[in-house]
Image (cartoon, rainbow, N blue to C red):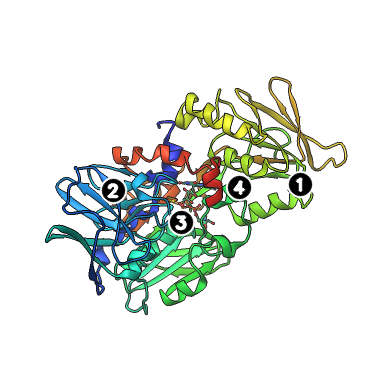
């Protein structure tokens, strides 16, 4: 398995959103809205070269802008800004097959339809007709849509019929799946079963801004699920009978399905070293309760000694987020942070950036053990490195990777997990060897395309380490 796979799995390979297009294609319908023509300022003809993008202003609409992008011999007009945090899409990367990748956090849009093809954006960009006439260029659309810089997916539905989709997991994969099902006209019942105590959240904000207020990071409010006829159940799925098409949960309830989407994401890895299992104030970071536990340990007063184990994205992001008022050390095994995904040279640039915020780095270092505090034998007091260094620690945060959350399938005789615990899918995200079972997001191993490799650098700018990104998070 190539070393960049864990990153790619988060970015694209296992990306849920594109799944949905494929998995829901069997149910799709579409809708059209009223529109009028608006002239583009200062453009007398369509003169873009293939592959070129240009942001243009719209006459008669205050601050009205659209993006023109030419793919092959066709010029497309879309919203000018990303629907995630509003990055100008003119800064993005446009591939010859019409995929536009946002420069800030790597969301991908289909330039021909505006559809989201990759997280973290949830809403599609709007798409406008381009008209060249009488020495001018016009776009056809609604003023409100041009101003909104997005297309609101229409997901309203009153569920009916015999079809029952059950989604196991309530992360961004699940969210993308259910939204796409409704947007594309699926009318059957849809149920999300999630072991998290909240609705699907924008997980990416947890490490960048340590937000524990669910109302600030839930991707959609409760009402949205209601009008979309999507049932949400907070429970842990314990097993699945694929023959009878029934999902069983830890609370003892069962749910039958006609189609099943598995989207249980990743489980953060713990360190199997002395002290790490026994001592308190050692944290993982995947959920709102994890963030809350970290914030409680940091306390109002802050000024804590914090050791972060792991110098990839999560370690770097959380270290940086806590550096302002605490004494943060990051431990990494490679010679530079992010080295395995971006190379040592680029990693060092990020190291320098974060060091300026006060973070200390211990690179090319291996952890030996965690030792108790002298004042509380049950809590961590220091982290020892194999080179003999002892780093004082009031709390420790582990950011050493995730494993696919497929424990509930481990002993299921019908399932063959990959060596890394993931589920192998085909290009349509159907799980190999099953009918009506799909796997998306971090638990799926999906055939890689070159277009997806383009996404790797985008995640670098999503680390929250750059001032602009911090402002956004
Ligand atoms: C702190 C942090 C920051 C990140 N930042 C970025 C970033 O900037 N850019 C980026 O591209 N990626 C980022 N990622 C990765 C990204 O969040 C994941 O790739 C994405 O969330 C995967 O979506 P998913 O739906 O597969 O899984 P998840 O979002 O993890 O959702 C899985 C869901 O399944 C539930 N579940 C698990 N097991 C069960 C069970 N047995 N029964 C019921 N429910 C279950 C979980 O509770 C959870 O609700 C970040 C991840 C973390 C943790
Ligand atoms: S602003 Fe575009 S992906 Fe975040």
Residue 387: image quadrant is: top right
Image quarter (top left, top right, bottom left or bottom right) of the N terminus: top left
The residue tagged with tag 4: helix, strand or loop?
Answer: loop
The residue tagged with tag 2: helix, strand or loop?
Answer: strand
Q: Earlier in the sequence, mark 2 or mark 3?
A: 2
Name which residue lies at 60% across and 22% down: 364
Query: Which residue in the structure is indicated by mark 4?
Result: 285
Q: CA distance from mark 2 to mark 1?
A: 46 Å
Tags 2 and 1 touching, CB below 8 Å: no
The location of residue 46, given as percent across then percent down, is 17, 51
Q: Earlier in the sequence, mark 2 or mark 1?
A: 2
Tags 2 and 3 touching, CB below 8 Å: no
Residue 324: image quadrant is: top right
Q: CA distance from mark 1 to mark 4?
A: 19 Å
Disc sitting over residue 302 in the figure = 1
Label 2 neighbourhood size at 10 Å, few (<14), some (14-19), many (20+)?
some
Taking the image as drawn, is residue 383 in sight?
Answer: yes
Tags 4 and 3 touching, CB below 8 Å: no
Asked whether mark 4 and ligand 1 are closer than 8 Å, the reply comes as: yes
Q: CA distance from mark 1 to mark 3?
A: 31 Å
Name which residue lies at 45% across and 30% down: 342
Q: CA distance from mark 2 to mark 4?
A: 39 Å
Query: Which residue in the structure is indicated by mark 2?
Result: 54
Name which residue lies at 83% across and 37% down: 373
Query: Which residue in the structure is indicated by mark 3?
Result: 172
The location of residue 276, given as percent across then percent down, is 70, 38
Q: CA distance from mark 2 to mark 3?
A: 31 Å
Towards the viewer: 140 or 185: 140
Q: Residue furthest right?
A: 375
The residue tagged with tag 1: helix, strand or loop?
Answer: loop
Q: Residue furthest top?
A: 387
């Amino acid at each position: 398995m190539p070393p960049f796979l864990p990153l790619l799995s988060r970015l694209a390979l296992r990306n849920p959103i594109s799944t949905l297009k494929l998995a829901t294609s069997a149910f799709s319908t579409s809708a059209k809205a009223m529109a009028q023509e608006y002239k583009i300022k200062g453009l007398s003809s369509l003169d873009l070269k293939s592959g070129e993008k240009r942001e243009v202003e719209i006459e008669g609409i205050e601050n009205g802008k659209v993006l023109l992008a030419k793919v092959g011999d066709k010029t497309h007009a879309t919203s000018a800004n990303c629907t995630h945090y509003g990055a100008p899409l003119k800064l993005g990367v446009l591939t010859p097959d019409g995929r536009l990748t946002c420069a800030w956090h790597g969301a991908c849009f289909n330039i021909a339809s505006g559809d989201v093809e990759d997280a973290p954006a949830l809403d599609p960009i709007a798409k406008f007709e381009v008209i060249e006439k009488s020495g001018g260029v016009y776009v056809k659309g609604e003023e409100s849509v041009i101003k909104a810089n997005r297309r609101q997916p229409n997901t309203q539905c009153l569920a009916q019929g015999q079809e029952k989709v059950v989604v196991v997991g309530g992360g961004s994969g699940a969210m993308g799946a259910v939204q796409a099902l409704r947007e594309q006209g699926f009318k059957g019942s849809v149920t999300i079963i999630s072991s998290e105590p909240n609705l699907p959240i924008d997980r990416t904000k947890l490490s960048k801004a340590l937000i524990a207020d669910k109302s600030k990071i839930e991707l959609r409010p409760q009402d949205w699920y209601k009008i979309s006829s999507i049932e949400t159940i907070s429970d842990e799925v314990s097993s699945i009978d694929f023959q009878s098409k029934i999902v069983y949960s830890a609370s003892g309830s069962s749910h039958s399905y006609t189609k099943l989407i598995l989207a249980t994401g990743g489980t953060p890895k713990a360190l199997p070293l002395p002290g790490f299992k026994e001592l308190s104030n050692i944290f993982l970071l995947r959920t709102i309760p994890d963030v809350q536990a970290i914030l409680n340990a940091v306390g109002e007063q802050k000024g804590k000694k914090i050791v972060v184990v792991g110098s990839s994205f999560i370690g770097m992001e959380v270290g940086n987020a806590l550096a302002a008022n605490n004494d943060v050390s990051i431990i990494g095994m490679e010679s530079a942070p992010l080295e395995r995904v971006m190379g040592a040279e680029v990693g060092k640039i990020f190291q320098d950036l974060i060091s300026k915020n006060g973070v200390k780095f211990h690179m090319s270092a291996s952890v030996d053990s965690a030792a108790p505090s002298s004042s509380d034998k049950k809590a961590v007091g220091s982290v020892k490195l194999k080179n003999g260094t002892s780093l004082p620690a009031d709390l420790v945060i582990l950011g050493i990777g995730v494993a696919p959350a497929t424990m509930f399938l481990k002993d299921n005789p019908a399932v063959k997990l990959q060596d890394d615990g993931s589920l192998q899918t085909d290009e349509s995200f159907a799980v190999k060897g099953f009918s009506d079972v799909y796997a998306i997001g971090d638990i799926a191993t999906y055939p890689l395309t070159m277009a997806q490799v383009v996404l790797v650098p985008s995640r670098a700018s999503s680390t929250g380490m750059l001032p602009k990104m911090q402002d956004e998070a």
